[in-house]
Image (cartoon, rainbow, N blue to C red):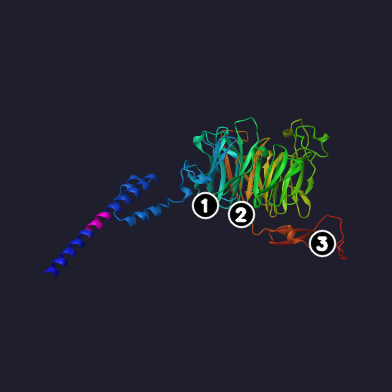
């Protein structure tokens, strides 16, 4: 009898405990559902999805994982910047934030080769800046409210999706604004100005678009960082026009300065910089009487970024109006040596020539007809070279002409009118530039244009073709995909009795 009572008592206790666990599990599940439901609502999921009855805690966890809400910076709204991706600017009481967030800014891609295409148009109170960039995966451009540039965007070259990657915090009111930027691979560098004083001094920031998206200041306002250009392993910038050249080493975080050359414009490839500069002590200005202050007028110089060794390339008699452009074994630049004066204004002169200069063989070739008009703002991405043909659409601008230097194929980009004074970026046979779509002086219809060109095949340095013969030029032919050693025009002796 006692045994039977004991069994009944144990069964009753087991049933009671099981009922408690079931109720507790139900309560836990309800609490998880409420918590995750709030998370879904915060993520702006549609009402239909957030109102669904989710009965299994495992299903809820899977849904949250599918949303990928944790540590996904690609889906941060504009106001939700992680603290580690923002830098306070003490001089402007501003905050710069650096992180990719989705944007509805329009971006239009093209599949056509050799045709210019409008990537980004101006819209009301949202204007494109004259600064832009590109890498293998993205086009980059800046948009501005009237007078102040506030945001940098990137457009995915595969699907046209757009992200805002650099901006001021909108709630803080802008005491500063972006001036220019440049991109190389996953690095971006930009200059930042202040509206709080009349000074045009600028600071510079370097950002890495991988990992934690680190942003750091590499030059304060006292350094006066203008027009920074990044090409691994250096960021190069100049002081206020025309100032000293600064070279910042990304690997070590150290900086050096080239004094004695007042730089007005430059371009570099990570090894050498080519600068338009005046030799002087620091008190010269391009508009002043520079001939009485130094031996040369504004001229083109080669600067070794490692050693700071300087060599002359061309001594100009007249001021060039655009920077040189380097790619591999070649640079192109505008030269005023052929100018013919019609009046005191430089646009009334003909003959601004585009010169192709072979850095290995030290030879040059004039690419333009100097009699018919002015040409400017040249670029090279060998075997392609291009420039603004000023004979087409006005004194300051025109259509861009692109030529294959080996096959002599030619393209005229007629959808976008390019101003000679504005930059163009060309990498891996892709180009991006600021332009107008009607006339070079139009402020109503401007934006960013792009163009793509066929991949010509392997390109090697002319230096790799050196044959030690002083009577030949060492040239790598992209068309033939091999080295060629053609007779040159130099006075030389190749020690061969069978040759003249």
Asked if the stretch drawn in magenta spans residue 20, the answer is yes
Picture quadrant of residue 239: top right
Q: Is residue 370 visible?
A: no
Q: Which residues are magenta?
A: 18-24
- Image side of residue 375 versus residue 117, left or right: right
Labels 2 & 1 near each other (Cβ < 8 A): no
Disc 2 target residue: 454
Residue depicted at 79% across the width and 46% down the height = 312
Question: Where is residue 1 shown, x and y percent of the image?
Answer: 11, 69
| Crowding near the residue tagged with mark 2, few <14, some 14–19, many ≥20 C-alpha atoms within 10 Å | few
Give the spatial CA distance, label 2 vs label 1: 17 Å
Q: Which callout, 1 or 3, points at the residue further toward the start of the chain?
A: 1
Give the spatial CA distance, label 3 vs label 2: 34 Å
Viewer-proximal residue among 248 and 284: 248
- Image side of residue 156 versus residue 228, left or right: left
Question: Where is residue 36 shown, x and y percent of the image?
Answer: 35, 49
Labels 1 & 3 near each other (Cβ < 8 A): no
Viewer-proximal residue among 96 and 386: 96
Q: Is residue 349 above or below residue 30?
A: above
Disc 3 target residue: 469
Q: What's the magenta bit mostly, secondary-structure-wise?
A: helix
Secondary element at tag 3: loop
The quarter in which the C terminus is drawn is bottom right
Q: Which callout, 3 or 2, points at the residue further toward the start of the chain?
A: 2
Give the spatial CA distance, label 1 vs label 3: 47 Å
Disc 1 target residue: 158
């Amino acid at each position: 009898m006692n045994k039977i009572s004991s069994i009944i008592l144990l069964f009753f206790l087991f049933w009671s405990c099981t009922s408690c666990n079931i109720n507790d599990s139900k309560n836990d599940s309800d609490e998880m559902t409420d918590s995750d439901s709030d998370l879904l609502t915060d993520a702006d999921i549609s009402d239909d999805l957030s109102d669904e009855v989710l009965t299994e805690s495992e299903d809820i966890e899977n849904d949250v994982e599918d949303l990928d809400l944790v540590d996904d910076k690609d889906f941060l709204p504009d106001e939700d910047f992680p603290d580690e991706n923002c830098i306070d600017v003490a001089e402007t009481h501003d905050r710069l934030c650096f992180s990719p967030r989705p944007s509805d800014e329009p971006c239009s891609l093209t599949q056509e080769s050799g045709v210019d295409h409008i990537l980004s148009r101006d819209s009301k109170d949202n204007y494109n800046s004259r600064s832009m960039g590109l890498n293998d995966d993205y086009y980059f451009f800046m948009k501005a409210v009237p007078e102040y540039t506030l945001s940098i965007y990137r457009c995915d070259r595969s699907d046209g999706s757009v992200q805002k990657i650099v901006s001021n915090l909108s709630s803080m009111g802008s005491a500063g604004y972006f001036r220019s930027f440049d991109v190389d691979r996953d690095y971006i560098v930009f200059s930042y100005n202040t509206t709080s004083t009349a000074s045009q001094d600028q600071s510079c920031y370097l950002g890495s678009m991988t990992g934690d998206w680190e942003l750091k200041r590499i030059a304060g306002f006292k350094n006066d960082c203008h027009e920074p250009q990044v090409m691994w392993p250096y960021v190069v910038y100049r002081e206020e026009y025309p100032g000293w050249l600064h070279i910042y080493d990304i690997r070590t975080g150290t900086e050096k300065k080239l004094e004695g050359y007042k730089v007005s414009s430059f371009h570099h490839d990570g090894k050498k910089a080519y600068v338009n500069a005046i030799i002087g002590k620091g008190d010269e200005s391009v508009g002043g009487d520079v001939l009485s202050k130094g031996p040369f007028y504004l001229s083109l110089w080669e600067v070794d970024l490692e050693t700071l060794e300087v060599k002359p390339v061309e001594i100009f008699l007249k001021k060039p109006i655009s920077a040189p452009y380097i790619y591999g074994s070649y640079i192109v630049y505008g030269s005023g040596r052929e100018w013919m004066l019609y009046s005191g204004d430089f646009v009334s002169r003909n003959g601004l020539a585009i010169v192709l200069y072979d850095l290995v063989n030290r030879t040059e070739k004039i690419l333009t007809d100097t009699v018919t008009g002015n040409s400017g703002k040249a670029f090279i991405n060998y075997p392609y070279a291009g420039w603004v043909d000023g004979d087409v659409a006005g004194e300051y601008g025109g259509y861009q002409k692109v030529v294959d230097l080996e096959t002599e194929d030619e393209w005229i980009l007629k959808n976008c009118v390019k101003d000679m004074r504005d930059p163009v970026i060309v990498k891996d046979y892709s180009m991006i530039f600021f332009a107008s779509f009607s006339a070079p002086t139009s402020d109503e219809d401007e934006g960013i244009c792009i163009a793509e060109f066929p991949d010509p095949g392997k390109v090697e340095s002319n230096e790799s073709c050196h044959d030690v013969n002083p009577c030949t030029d060492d040239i790598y032919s992209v068309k033939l995909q091999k080295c060629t050693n053609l007779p040159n025009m130099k006075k030389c002796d190749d020690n061969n009795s069978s040759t003249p």
